[in-house]
Structures are given as structure tokens and as C-alpha cells.
Image: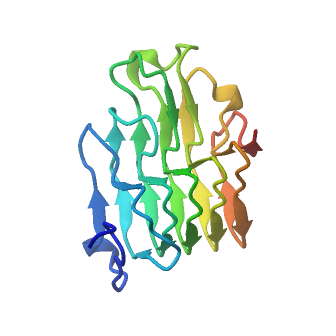
Amino acid sequence: PDKGITALSHKRKFGESILNQGARGNRVITNDNNGLTNADIIDGFTIGGSFANIASEGGGIYNKNSSPSIVNCIITDNSLFPFPYYINKTYGGGLYNDNSSPVLINCIIKNNKVGVDGNQASNSSYYGYGSALYNVNNSNPKLYNCTIKDNYSISGNNGDAPAIVNVGSSTTSLYNSIYMNNNKGTSSGIVSY
């Protein structure tokens, strides 16, 4: 289709519906200026396994000027650990939204990471922001009946590394959703700058 993914929908079968990047490299789903709207649906997938060491934004899903509906999905086990290490800031382990307002319904966002791994984890010059979601440039995602848990930053800014970050007139709206155990032992709230 001319927009890329315009209607990716089917009955939910977790064992048979896995989108897995599975290797060092890039994110799982990239919606870059493809014009998706809330009428375009990604339904019933596990979106995970990204170990994005080339991209610094969006481990699981990257939305730029793209606002799909994401329904009955599990966004899990995505990591933004840059290599080479001169890329020292990472944003949005689960989802990154740039001028994008996706709607998430009945989704789980868990165990996503930003920052650095290995021997650089204690280096104070490496930062990870928004281990679950990072929203910038008037992005206003809405989450209904979702669970956001066990997302964290492994980086020098653990003291200021909430799982959801809103920047540049962005907001995140949560409805009947659970937000728990994110960045255990450090700042775990939702931050807007």
C-alpha cells in the first residue's frame, strides 16, 4: 500500500503474532511520515526483541507524523543501547512519538529499556529518557485499559528517568490503566517538560 502499514489487523493469537527484530540493529516498526491515522489499526501483535544500537529513538515503535491505533498488543523487551557509544542519549524504549498521537487500547508495555549496557552503564554522560514512551512536538497519545510496567533506564540519569516523558507541548492521557514498577528505586513518575 502507498502508506506502508495501513490496516494490519487479525484475530489475536499471541503465539503466532510476534513481530520480533531479534538482532542488534534497528527498531521493530517504523512509521516515518507515512500518514497513518487512528483509522489505521495494528491489532493483536507482540512487538519486541529490538536491540536497537543504530537508532536512538523508538526501540519498539517509532511514529513520526503518524498516529495509528494500536490494539491488543504487547510491546516488550525492546532496548535502546547505542553503539558506537558516541550516541549517548536514547529516547522511547517502547514507543517514540514525534508529532504523533496514537491510540493504544488493551495493550501491555513492559520490560523496555533505554540508556546503555555493559561497562558504560555507570557512565554519567549516557542518558536514557522515556523507557516506555517518549513524546515530542505536540504528540498526544491516549492509552485505554493499558498496563505500563517494569520499564527502566540503565544510564547515568537513573535519578531522573521516568518511564513516560512528554516534551514540546506533548501530553499522555491514561484511562483505566495501570502504571507500576517502572524504574524501581529511582524516579518513576510521568514527566512533562
Q: In the image, residue 145 lies at what x, y percent?
A: 64, 74
Q: In the image, residue 2 lies at what x, y percent?
A: 29, 70
Judge from the rendering whether residue 148 lies leftward or rightward of residue 114; answer left or right: right
From the viewer's perspective, is residue 77 above or below residue 43? above
Judge from the rendering whether residue 72 lies leftward or rightward of residue 34; answer left or right: right
Q: Quadrant of residue 12?
A: bottom left
Front-most of 158 and 88? 88
Q: In the image, residue 188 lies at what x, y percent?
A: 71, 42
From the viewer's perspective, is residue 12 above or below residue 61? below
The C terminus: image quadrant: top right
Judge from the rendering whether residue 79 lies leftward or rightward of residue 122; answer left or right: left
Residue occupying the point 56% across, 65% down? 102
- Give the residue furthest to the bottom: 11
Front-most of 113 and 138? 138
Count of numbered circles in the view: 0
Residue occupying the point 63% across, 55% down? 139
Q: In the image, residue 150 lies at what x, y percent?
A: 57, 49
The chosen color scheme is rainbow
Residue occupying the point 39% across, 61% down? 34
Front-most of 129 and 182? 129
Q: Quadrant of residue 144?
A: bottom right
Q: Quadrant of residue 26?
A: top left
From the viewer's perspective, is residue 65 above or below residue 105? above
Residue occupying the point 26% across, 73% down? 1
